[in-house]
């Protein structure tokens, strides 16, 4: 079933963007990467802020990370897309061959990148392990689009999207206390999933959720 969902996600994104042309696809790709990387980097902090907003919201703790990552993504992508559309009122024109090849390549790139991001977020969703990523040691879909995305986030958290271990930006609080990988000992950065335990941790979390009668705490 999940294979069909993955194929549908890829096909819909490619088809929706192919018709918009090379220039629009280029803008969408840049906006998508910025929005999805930001969402992947700060969703935990936004979820914590939402949980602290009220007891009612906190009772939906098991859903907050999944909701947060998509909320940040859509909000950021919408703003970036609106700004770039405003600044790019006149689209660049290309010859027919360049336009055809360019829109095909970029729409496929967008579709694959979106699939990677979506597979990453599915680990945060209240989906039973039997329905998604049954064995955390095996690659999703056989080639691991989720692992590709996790690798990208991890590398960016060491670089362009890094935050200091004592940073308080985006709701970061307290000292960074994840086990530090030997390669990161000299870095003053909150490295995302430094020891590659994200999938194992989320699989166990989803196993625990599968045994609960409701997704809302205290109900």
Image (cartoon, helix red, strand yellow):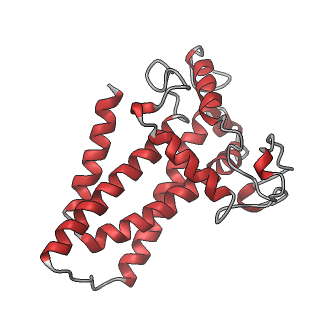
- Residue 112 falls left or right of residue 148: left
Q: Residue furthest front?
A: 183
For the residue pair 58 and 76, the one nearer the viewer reads as: 76
- Residue 23 falls left or right of residue 37: left
Residue drawn at x 63%, y 51% is 154
Considering only vertical position in the picture, is 29 above or below 126?
Answer: below
Q: Position of residue 97 (x, y in %)?
A: 14, 73
For the residue pair 185 and 55, the one nearer the viewer reads as: 185
Considering only vertical position in the picture, is 89 above or below 31?
Answer: below
Residue drawn at x 46%, y 68% is 79
Q: Position of residue 196 (x, y in %)?
A: 66, 38
- Residue 118 falls left or right of residue 20: right
Q: Quadrant of residue 210?
A: top right
Tally of numbered tags: 0
Q: Quadrant of residue 159?
A: bottom right
Q: Position of residue 195 (x, y in %)?
A: 71, 39
The C terminus: image quadrant: top right
The N terminus: image quadrant: top left
Q: Residue furthest left?
A: 96
Considering only vertical position in the picture, is 2 above or below 168?
Answer: above
Considering only vertical position in the picture, is 83 above or below 17?
Answer: below
Residue drawn at x 59%, y 13% is 211
């Amino acid at each position: 079933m999940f294979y069909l969902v993955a194929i549908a996600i890829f096909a819909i994104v490619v088809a929706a963007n192919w018709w918009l042309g090379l220039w629009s696809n280029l803008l969408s790709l840049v906006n998508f990467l910025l929005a999805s990387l930001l969402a992947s980097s700060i969703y935990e902090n936004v979820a914590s802020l939402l949980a602290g907003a009220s007891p009612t919201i906190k009772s939906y703790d098991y859903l907050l990370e999944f909701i947060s990552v998509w909320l940040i993504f859509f909000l950021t992508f919408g703003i970036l897309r609106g700004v770039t559309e405003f600044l790019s009122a006149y689209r660049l024109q290309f010859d027919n061959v360049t336009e055809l090849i360019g829109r095909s390549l970029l729409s496929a790139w967008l579709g694959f990148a979106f699939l990677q991001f979506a597979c990453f977020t599915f680990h945060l969703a209240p989906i039973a392990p039997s329905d998604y990523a049954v064995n955390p040691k095996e690659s999703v879909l056989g080639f691991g689009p989720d692992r590709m995305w996790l690798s990208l986030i991890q590398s960016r958290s060491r670089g362009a999207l890094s935050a200091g271990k004592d940073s308080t930006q985006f709701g970061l609080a307290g000292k960074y206390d994840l086990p530090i990988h030997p390669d990161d000992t000299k870095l003053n950065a909150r490295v995302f999933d430094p020891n590659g335990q994200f999938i194992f941790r989320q699989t166990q979390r989803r196993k625990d959720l599968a045994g609960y009668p409701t997704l809302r705490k205290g109900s």
